[in-house]
Amino acid sequence: MILERIASPADVKRLPRPELDQLAREIRETLIRVCAANGGHLAPNLGVVELTLALHRVLELPRDVVVWDVSHQSYVHKLLTGRAGRFETLRQAGGISGFAMRTESEYDQFGAGHASTAISAALGMATARDLKGGSETVVAVIGDGAMTGGLAYEAINNAGLLKSNFIVILNDNEMSIAPNVGSIASYLGVLRSKPFFTWGREVTKGVLDHVPLGGTARKALSTAELAAMRFVSPEHKAPVIFEEMGFRYIGPVDGHDLDTLIDVISNARKIGGPVLLHVKTVKGKGYDIAEGDSRTFHGVGPGVYHPDEGKLEKKAARITFAQAFADALIAAAQRDPRVIGITAAMPDGTGLAKFAKAFPSRYFDVGIAEAHAVCFGAGASTRGIRPVAAIYSTFLQRAYDQIVHDVAIQQLPVVFAMDRAGFVGDDGPTHMGLYDVAYLRTLPGITIMAPRNEYEVGPMLDLALTLDGPAAIRYPRGSTSGKHDEPLAPLVLGRAEVLREGSDVAILALGNTVDVALDAYELLDADGVRPTVVNARFVAPLDETLLIELAETHHRFITLEEHSLAGGFGSAVVEFLSDRGIVAAVERIGVPNVLVQHASQAAQRAQVGLSAENVAARVRTLTPSQTA
Ligand SMILES: Cc1ncc(C[n+]2csc(CCOP(=O)(O)OP(=O)(O)O)c2C)c(N)n1
Ligand SMILES: CC(=O)[C@@H](O)[C@H](O)COP(=O)(O)O
Ligand SMILES: [Mg+2]
């Protein structure tokens, strides 16, 4: 295998040209095989094989820099930068991350997981280079989906002012996770359809005829050659938005034509100022089922498809929290015509795709634009609409000022359905939903809830839609075990649910950690140890009445949460008790102040002590009859 011989980008540069095609095939075969077993972002990576090879062929890495936007498409780069031997460990505990990570390799010069950051970061790097008198090439690779995020335009705006030399490669595969939406997506479609490709290619070849190829010692392009590289065809009179904003626009270029890519990137390096190279790629390229359904193959779990047979594996699964939310939202919308659903480019993950089918005119995919999603909802709510913004906990971080300034301060009834709250598993630290309680519970007037299982999502959404102010419902990725589907007590604002009445120790569990508490109870019950188990339901308002009662009858609390201990639910309990002068010993089990790395959700839970065995052991230690 040629791939086995690639220890660094220098090896890619040395390969005879015909071997690059074989290398591309081996890379695709590796991606398909490893993602089948481990899960991962298969289709985005299959689409950038030639682009990544071209970058590695042209640039001097790691002296030069590539900043990958989101970086879910950086697997090929990883395979070419000394990580092929460990690639089988992709997304597994202790293994290769599914995203670029500064701690993983000197070739990952900027980490990511959230979208639309690459142009900003690359511009910052180019500016640092200029301040230090350096000459390295800085490249940002950003997808068409990520180009719907406002941060990208803030960076483009600034680049037009700074005029730094750097290259933005727009990897346009006409897809976000779902089809890309909005006027930027339409505009890119217009650019794609213009006859730049043929024209541009001819010009490129014309330019190359005058430029000696090979190495970095090419002569500078002449003014005439540079002018030719603007690729403005006579029949194309409309301004190119990127040109108007201070970039030299090149493209569209076939992102699977390796030779053209190598030529064009080589030349783009020689152009002064910001350059935008528009590359057309096919998401899932080279693997039929992924090409045919790049939406499913954007990101897949382990064992979702059979790599050789090229077909999806069918698995019966319990309803997920996201599906329960989608059903509850549809039911709410059927009852109340004011209810709308908003997603920031995550219709599948949040379940809103189902809502979109039921209520197409009340469904809004605003692009990768969480801040706008929240402010848009806030605006709509001032006119009597009941917006439900379904946004992953981690991505809602981006809209924090909108939550504070545009929702909470204005006391508007926007509902935040915060999916992926807690451990997300193999996506790793960029995607963990561990901070939402901390960043929300300081806001006056907000209601924060967490359902103990899938069936509690509906009542919580219904309650949220009756409130006059903002409400957030946090729920995790996937499902609960299904072992504790006992009927739910009616939901009352600010009241917890006592599930087991015991003595000595009271376990106060938030959301899906109720499962852990009930499992622990079963372990203990067998030995006659019976703690009280409470489904907290609300972080705000806290069930203060119950806390006071429990403090009188129990000598110890244990709080459980899939959230940062700093500022989380346990902290809220401790603060309340302390403020009331109630002396109670509280042990908080949750996530300490460390970055949680990629691993399975079960492993992440166990790592912080959110396992039935650990909770049972803690209860035993704290129960007087057990310690005597
Ligand atoms: C701030 C933020 N919101 C949402 C996401 C989820 N997300 C990850 S990749 C993606 C689509 C990106 O599309 P594009 O940039 O075109 O890359 P492609 O996968 O098509 O290569 C989305 C919405 C994210 N990573 N970051
Ligand atoms: C790269 C990215 O941000 C998304 O693709 C994310 O990995 C989706 O996570 P889920 O699989 O939990 O929807
Ligand atoms: Mg895309």
Image (cartoon, rainbow, N blue to C red):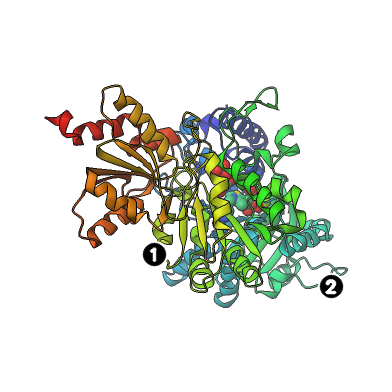
Task: Tell me where residue 228 sits by quadrant.
Answer: bottom right
Residue 237 in view of the camera? yes
Q: Which residue is mark 2?
A: 237
Residue closest to the far left: 628
Across and down, in percent, residue 126 comes to 50, 66
Left or right of 176 in this view: 11? left
Labelled disc at residue 484: none
- Image quarter where the N terminus lies is top right
Task: Give how far across and how far down residue 548 sits, in percent.
Answer: 28, 53
Estimate the spatial distance between the alpha carbons at disc 1 and disc 2, rounded to whole Å: 53 Å
N-term-proximal mark, 1 vs 2: 2
Judge depth for marks 1 and 2 and give the one in front.
Answer: 1
Q: Residue at x 39, y 64 (%)?
A: 442
- How many numbered marks have been drawn onto this rendered protein structure? 2
Measured as percent of width and height from the top left, residue 607 is found at: 34, 36
| Nearer to the camera, 309 or 531 | 531
Q: Residue at x 63, y 26 (%)?
A: 315
Residue at the spot of label 1: 442
Residue occupying the point 50% across, 30% down: 482
For the C terminus, give its image quadrant.
Answer: top left
Neighbor class of circle 2 (other Cα within 10 Å; few <14, some 14-19, many 20+) is few
Q: Could you say which is closer to the camera, residue 501 or residue 29?
A: 501
Q: Amino acid at mark 1?
A: Thr
